[in-house]
Amino acid sequence: MIKKILVANRGEIAVRVMRSCREMGILSVAIFSEADRSSMHVRYADEAYYVGPSPSNESYLKMDKILEIALISKADAIHPGYGFLSENTDFARLVASNGLIFIGPSPEAISSMGDKVTARKLMEASGVPVVPGTKKSIQNTEELHQIAHNIGYPIMIKASAGGGGKGMRLVKNEEELESSYNMAKSEARSSFGDDTIYIEKYIESPHHIEFQVLADQHGNTIHLFERECSVQRRHQKVVEETPSPHMTPELRNQMGEYAIKAAQSVNYVGAGTIEFLVDDKRNFYFLEMNTRLQVEHPITERITGVDLVKEQIKIASGEPLTYMQNDISMHGHSIECRIYAEDPQNNFMPNPGLIRHISEPLGLGVRTDGYVYEGYEIPMHYDPMISKLIIWAKTRVEAIERMKRALYEYKITGVKTSIPFLEKIMDTPDFVEGRYNTHFIEKNTKYLELNEPCELECQDIAMFVTYLDFIKSQESQVQDNVTNKPSPWKEFGKKRNLLRL
């Protein structure tokens, strides 16, 4: 039995894992950098240990230090969350060699699927459809030109060890080829320490659809249906939903079977995601496997009722899967919006700073996975995502309306956030009608512009003026005036509605 888990991560995913631990009666151990001393995951955990200075390469990526803390705290297992060391083969081996349980797949599975070239070969050998492309890394520019010519433009240059859109370049013609290749190699080297590059045929108008899989140590593998992840900006997912509006029951069954086959090809154990590209004619191709929990896992939990973190822990403990394939069914529709501390009117620049006020949405079918609170200062050293807003409803139409309501209720002041941009997405006809692909944001750039008169600034000013008015009312202590005065929050709501007209 696992009795204590060290969570080798920070922010919302650390809190998310710890919540499942608490429900299972398992103690949780947090690690924190200098910048994260007051972070929510530190407050929530049963124990917390300083791991190093603020930069992640001096704290959350320090494998030896994390192992030292795990042993000192007498943890039984380590959960890596996502990002940082979650897909690091060396870390998984180090955990096991120190007699601890790594809550994730084997180092061999991470290595096989982490290298995109190796993964492509494995999928082809297993009969899983793959995008036409190279079967080995590109060695020189002469080979680069020859292969690009044989595949035909447009092509995608990708880092073999890549992820999150890094080390990736779309090349539309030969003139762009060498410069794109050099930039991709350089970015891959700085981001992953590995500049191995390969080429794929670029699929026009693709849908990015992924399947959640679970596999235990006893040979059982299941899938938990798909997630539509095509709303992307710079190859980073912004909004996800399930079921996919592009999916048919026949395609779902077929892709689900291939997702299971892909996981079984590397003897996968744990929670993972098989990602596919699907064209407009519903031809699908293996893209990659993420050998960890995904950011968007809550929408799968919401439509299936399965706690994926609990399943990860049970699998790591050696238990068989709680569910078989026939036990899994979809109920309703779920959408997730990623909330970033960034400025939509300034090319989405990160906007760290002090949270002066936060009011999270509530009500039926609303879930917020976050880690910030009023008075917390968002550090500049990490990814700007501060929370995930997850909605469930009986139908897709109702889910969109509920998401719009929840975004309207979500109030954060002190920093700029992506909430106004997400509100725009929920109103965009292409999204509402479910006819979108990975070009959605590019295609709807004009519609998504925050160009109403002072849209963001006026909201901040209105909130500020309302607050000053409230303070003044308190200080005056003139009860008669206060009684007859309309609510300042109602006044703010009226002003905000006028901005929408």
Image (cartoon, helix red, strand yellow):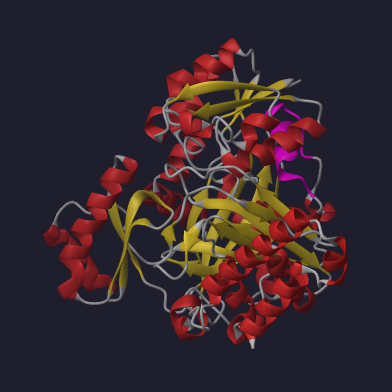
Question: Could you say which quadrant of the image residue 336 lies in?
Answer: bottom right
Nearer the observer, 72 or 498: 498
- Residue at left 81%, top 40%? 322
Reply above or below: 109 against 489.
above
- Residue at left 52%, top 83%? 453
Nearer the observer, 2 or 131: 2
Nearer the observer, 282 or 195: 195
The verdict on residue 231 being magenta is no
- Residue at left 75%, top 67%? 489
- Residue at left 54%, top 46%? 265
Q: Which residues are magenta?
A: 306-321
Q: Taking 31 as reference, is 329 left or right?
A: right
Reply above or below: 179 against 357.
below
**The N terminus, quarter of image:** top right
Q: Position of residue 469 (x, y in %)?
A: 69, 64
Say if residue 312 shows up in the picture: yes
The verdict on residue 315 being magenta is yes
Nearer the observer, 53 or 237: 53
- Point out the residue furthest to the left here: 142
Q: Position of residue 241 (x, y in %)?
A: 66, 66
Question: Could you say which quadrant of the image residue 411 lies in?
Answer: bottom right
Q: How many marks are shown on the rendered structure?
A: 0
Q: Position of residue 249 (x, y in %)?
A: 73, 73
Reply above or below: 126 against 393.
above
Say if residue 434 shows up in the picture: no
Q: Position of residue 458 (x, y in %)?
A: 56, 74
**The C terminus, quarter of image:** bottom right
Reply above or below: 426 against 35.
below
